[in-house]
Image (spheres, rainbow, N blue to C red):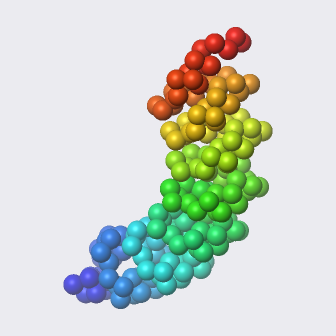
C-alpha cells in the first residue's frame, strides 16, 4: 500500500506518507527522489530513515532538506559531523537543537562563528557539562540568558549564572523550573 501511495498525485498524501515512522525502505528510496523538494523535507523528519537515505538527504542541494535532517533525533554521527560543517548557518542552527547531538558535534558547534548557532546549542537539553561551564562565561549575554533557561543545567553552572553581571541572566535563571536551592539562595542574597 505504501508503494502505491508514493505515486499519489496529491502532494499531501506523499508528504504525510514520508513522515510515516513505519515507512518501508523501498518507499524511502522512492521519496528521496521525489520531484517536489517539500516531500524530501518531510522525509528528512522521519525518525526511522535508513542510513543510505540519510546520506542522500545530507547531500541534497536544498538547505531546508538539510535543516530538517539536521534536527532528526536519529541522525547518524557521521552525518551530524558533516552537517556541523555545512556552509549554511541555518543547517547548523537546526543541528544544534538536535536532542541526540553527539558530544564531538556539540564541541564543534560551541565554537561556531555565528552566535545564532551557539544560542540554539545552549537550549539543547542534553548539552554536556563542560560546554555549559564554558558557555556560562560567553561574551554574548543572550547566550547566557538562553543557557539559564535550560532545564538540565548542572548545579555548578547555575551557581555561576546566579553571579552573572547581567541581571536578566539572573532573572531568567530564577524562572528555571529546575533551579537548585543553592542557586536560588545565591540569587536572593546577592546585593546589587
Q: Residue at x 39, y 73 (%)?
A: 48
Q: Residue furthest left?
A: 1
Give x and y (percent) for residue 54: 50, 78
Asked if 59 appears above or below 91 in the picture, the reply is: below
Q: Quadrant of residue 55?
A: bottom right
Asked if 97 appears above or below 40 in the picture, the reply is: above
Q: Quadrant of residue 16?
A: bottom left
From the viewer's side, name the closer residue of 23 and 13: 23
Task: Give the number of marks.
Answer: 0
Residue 101 falls left or right of residue 48: right
Question: Is residue 2 something one can see in this rendering?
Answer: yes
Question: Is residue 34 something one can see in this rendering?
Answer: no
For the N terminus, the quadrant is: bottom left
Residue 164 falls left or right of residue 41: right
Q: Quadrant of residue 171?
A: top right
Give x and y (percent) for residue 183: 59, 25
From the viewer's side, name the closer residue of 168 and 153: 153
Give x and y (percent) for residue 18: 36, 74
Q: Residue at x 52, y 47 (%)?
A: 125
Give x and y (percent) for residue 50: 43, 80
Asked if 132 appears above or below 62 in the picture, the reply is: above
Asked if 174 appears above or below 122 in the picture, the reply is: above
For the C terminus, the quadrant is: top right
From the viewer's side, name the closer residue of 174 and 46: 174
Q: Residue at x 51, y 60 (%)?
A: 100
Q: Residue at x 57, y 71 (%)?
A: 77
Amino acid at each position: 500500500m505504501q508503494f502505491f501511495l508514493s505515486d499519489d498525485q496529491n502532494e499531501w498524501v506523499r508528504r504525510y506518507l514520508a513522515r510515516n515512522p513505519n515507512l518501508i525502505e523501498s518507499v524511502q528510496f522512492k521519496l528521496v527522489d521525489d520531484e517536489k523538494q517539500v516531500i524530501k523535507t518531510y522525509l528528512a523528519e522521519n525518525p526511522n530513515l535508513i542510513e543510505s537515505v540519510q546520506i542522500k538527504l545530507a547531500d541534497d542541494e536544498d538547505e531546508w532538506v538539510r535543516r530538517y535532517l539536521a534536527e532528526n533525533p536519529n541522525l547518524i554521527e557521521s552525518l551530524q559531523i558533516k552537517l556541523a560543517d555545512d556552509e549554511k548557518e541555518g543547517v547548523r542552527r537546526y543541528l544544534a537543537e538536535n536532542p541526540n547531538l553527539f558530544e564531538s558535534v556539540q564541541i564543534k558547534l560551541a565554537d561556531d562563528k555565528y552566535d545564532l548557532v551557539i544560542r540554539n546549542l545552549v537550549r539543547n537539553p542534553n548539552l554536556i557539562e563542560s560546554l555549559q561551564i564554558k558557555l556560562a562565561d560567553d561574551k554574548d549575554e543572550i547566550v547566557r540568558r538562553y543557557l539559564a533557561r535550560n532545564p538540565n543545567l548542572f548545579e555548578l553552572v547555575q551557581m555561576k549564572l546566579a553571579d552573572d553581571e547581567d541581571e536578566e541572566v539572573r532573572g531568567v535563571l530564577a524562572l528555571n523550573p529546575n533551579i537548585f536551592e543553592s542557586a536560588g539562595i545565591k540569587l536572593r542574597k546577592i546585593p546589587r
